[in-house]
């Protein structure tokens, strides 16, 4: 007795049906185990590529803006330099004393006292009062204040007391005492995040 193999003696559509089933099984297996992982990997790579291309475009845009940013930094540094002349980051006692002494000598004053006081801390600056006493004429006192107002550094005059001067030099008709208050910029304290980064 012979065993029949194959589809001999069966209708033709059975062969087509078996072929379709075998082809579908092969396609499904190839799709699940071969094509689908490759397709997912391809999608990931395309997403990564799109992200990198976006970063490249941002980098190119930033590169085009670089000259403008450099110019802005330069202008800000110039502005900071001007502001530091108005509100310096240090007291410069010797320079300030020299300039005020020079003004008193130009105005024919006798500088009796120049006493820096204690600093008073504020939010982003420190007040630095300086007590000044001098003898001179009314006109020269007005010139002194006018010249002080032209300093690049901020100096406020407070507590002005003027009295007649009957002793000493007859040209020095008055005695004046006042407090010249100037200001010193305080560098902000580094935050704990910045300290850890360093």
Image (cartoon, helix red, strand yellow):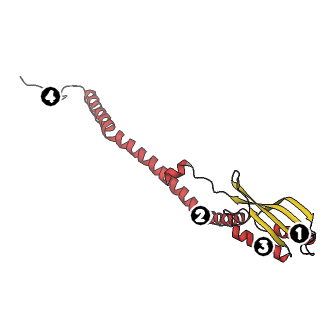
Expressed as whole percent of the image width and height from the top left, the position of residue 160 reads 87, 60
Mark 3 or mark 2, whichever is nearer to me = 3
| Residue 115 location (% of width, % of height) | 75, 63
Dot 3 crowding, Cα within 10 Å, few <14, some 14–19, many 20+: some
- Residue 50 vertical placement versus 155 (above, below): above
Secondary structure beneath dot 3 equals helix
Residue pointed to by mark 1: 141
Secondary structure category for the residue under label 4 = loop
Q: Which disc is residue 66 wearing? A: 2
**Of pointers 1 and 3, the one earlier in the residue sequence:** 3
First in sequence: mark 3 vs mark 2: 2
Q: From the viewer's perspective, is residue 139 above or below residue 83?
A: below
Q: CA distance from mark 1 to mark 2?
A: 52 Å
Disc 1/disc 3 C-alpha distance (Å):
13 Å
Residue positioned 57% across, 52% down in the render:
190
Which of the two labelled residues, at mark 4 and mark 2, occupies the earlier sequence position? 4
Q: For mark 3, what is the residue?
A: 101
């Amino acid at each position: 007795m012979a065993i029949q193999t194959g589809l001999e003696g069966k209708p033709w559509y059975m062969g087509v049906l078996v072929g379709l089933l075998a082809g579908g099984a092969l396609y499904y297996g190839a799709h699940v185990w071969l094509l689908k992982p490759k397709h997912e990997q391809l999608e990931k790579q395309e997403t990564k590529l799109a992200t990198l291309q976006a970063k490249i475009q941002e980098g190119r845009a930033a590169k085009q803006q670089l000259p403008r940013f450099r110019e802005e930094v330069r202008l800000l540094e110039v502005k900071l330099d001007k502001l530091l002349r108005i509100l310096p980051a240090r007291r410069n006692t010797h320079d300030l004393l020299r300039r005020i002494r020079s003004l008193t000598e130009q105005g024919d004053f006798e500088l009796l006292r120049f006493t820096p006081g204690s600093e008073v801390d504020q939010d982003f600056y420190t007040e630095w009062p300086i007590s000044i006493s001098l003898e001179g004429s009314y006109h020269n006192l007005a010139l002194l204040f006018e010249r002080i107002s032209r300093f690049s550094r901020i100096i406020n005059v407070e507590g002005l007391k003027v009295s007649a001067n009957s002793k000493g030099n007859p040209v020095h008709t008055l005695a004046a005492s006042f407090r010249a208050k100037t200001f010193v910029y305080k560098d902000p304290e580094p935050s704990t995040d910045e300290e850890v980064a360093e």
